[in-house]
Image (cartoon, grey):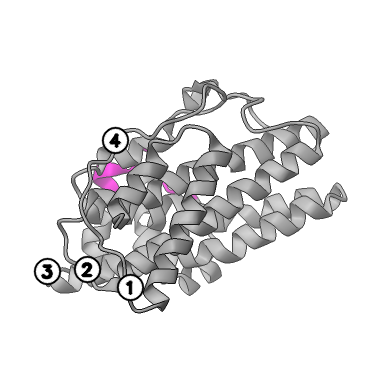
């Protein structure tokens, strides 16, 4: 019987984006089917790669070298869709990585359900973005992409609380801040397909941030730690950059991120 950790490594070691997400969705379906049948698959153990397999294209550049996107033009909107596709593909790997890398930490079944569901949804998001790119005559890999996105995963490879703090609670939360503006750009351009795809992503990303907050608080409770203080310490340790407003305070609150978690980090960055 294939374990969840083995499924995760299968996804992580698959390079092609469409193939990776097809495996991701199939493994997620198998996990939930077994849970529904009362015969859950074992979590198991496996050794995930430090970096996931990636296709030859896109070329991965230092963030400072990636051309700036101006969404007012068709080319700029294609670049924006490409950037979102790249983010979603990284998110697929990030969610499977957390399932394979931290199997030594005991969790209730809900932890695995949450991250398998998140990985499945990110796979759907990547495919939606690829569909939008192809509708515009482009494809994932046609443009260079950001090489820095996996850095948070490498930095927190041995720190689960750090991973939860930085990936869902900082990086994915940023998506809640910027996605409404992206939706408006495509609405103004009359691209209803991209609007629908981004609205799906926006709605479901709230849940992914919420999973991070839920399990971060769970671990803090297990170890009798103050969640806010620990969050501030971990973000200062692992997040390479500043938290910059404006923030989507309403959606962040819906995802379990209170104001006093992230606003003090802006102040400390500016100090």
Residue, far front:
1
Determine crowd level at label 1: few under 14, some 14-19, many 20+ residues with C-alpha closer than 10 A.
few
Q: Tell which circle, 3 or 2, labels the residue nearer the N-terminal end.
A: 2
Taking the image as shown, residue 68 lies to the left or right of residue 120, namely right
- Per the image, the residue denoted by label 2 is 107
In this orientation, which residue lies closer to the viewer: 4 or 157? 4
- Per the image, the residue denoted by label 4 is 49
Give x and y (percent) for residue 1.
29, 57
Q: Are marks 2 and 1 in contact (CB under 8 Å)?
A: yes
Residue 114, quarter of the rendered image: bottom left
In this orientation, which residue lies closer to the viewer: 123 or 190? 123
Alpha carbon distance from label 2 to label 1: 8 Å
Which residue sits at x=28%, y=50%? Answer: 100
Give x and y (percent) for residue 265.
35, 53
Mark 4: which secondary structure?
A: loop
Tag shown at residue 110: 1
């Amino acid at each position: 019987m294939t374990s969840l950790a083995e499924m995760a490594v299968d996804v992580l070691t698959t390079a092609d984006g469409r193939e990776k997400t097809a495996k991701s969705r199939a493994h997620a379906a198998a996990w939930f089917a077994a849970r529904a049948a009362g015969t859950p698959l074992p979590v198991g153990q496996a050794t995930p790669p430090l970096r996931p397999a990636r296709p030859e294209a896109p070329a991965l550049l230092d963030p400072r070298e990636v051309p700036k996107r101006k969404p007012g033009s068709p080319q700029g909107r294609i670049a924006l869709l490409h950037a979102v596709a790249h983010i979603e593909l990284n998110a697929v790997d990030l969610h499977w990585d957390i399932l394979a890398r931290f199997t030594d930490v005991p969790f209730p079944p809900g932890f695995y359900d949450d991250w398998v569901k998140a990985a499945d949804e990110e796979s759907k998001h990547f495919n939606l973005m690829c569909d939008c790119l192809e509708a515009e005559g482009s494809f994932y890999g046609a443009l260079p992409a950001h090489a820095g996105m996996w850095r948070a995963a490498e930095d927190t490879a041995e720190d689960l609380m750090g991973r939860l703090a930085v990936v869902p609670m900082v990086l994915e939360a940023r998506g809640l801040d910027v996605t409404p503006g992206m939706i408006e750009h495509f609405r103004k351009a009359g691209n209803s397909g991209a609007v629908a795809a981004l609205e799906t992503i926006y709605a479901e990303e709230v849940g992914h941030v919420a999973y991070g907050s839920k399990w971060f608080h769970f671990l803090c409770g297990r170890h009798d730690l103050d969640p806010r203080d620990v969050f501030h310490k971990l973000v200062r340790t692992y997040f390479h950059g500043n938290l910059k407003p404006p923030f989507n305070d309403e959606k962040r609150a819906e995802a379990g991120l209170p104001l006093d978690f992230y606003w003090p980090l802006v102040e400390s960055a500016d100090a």
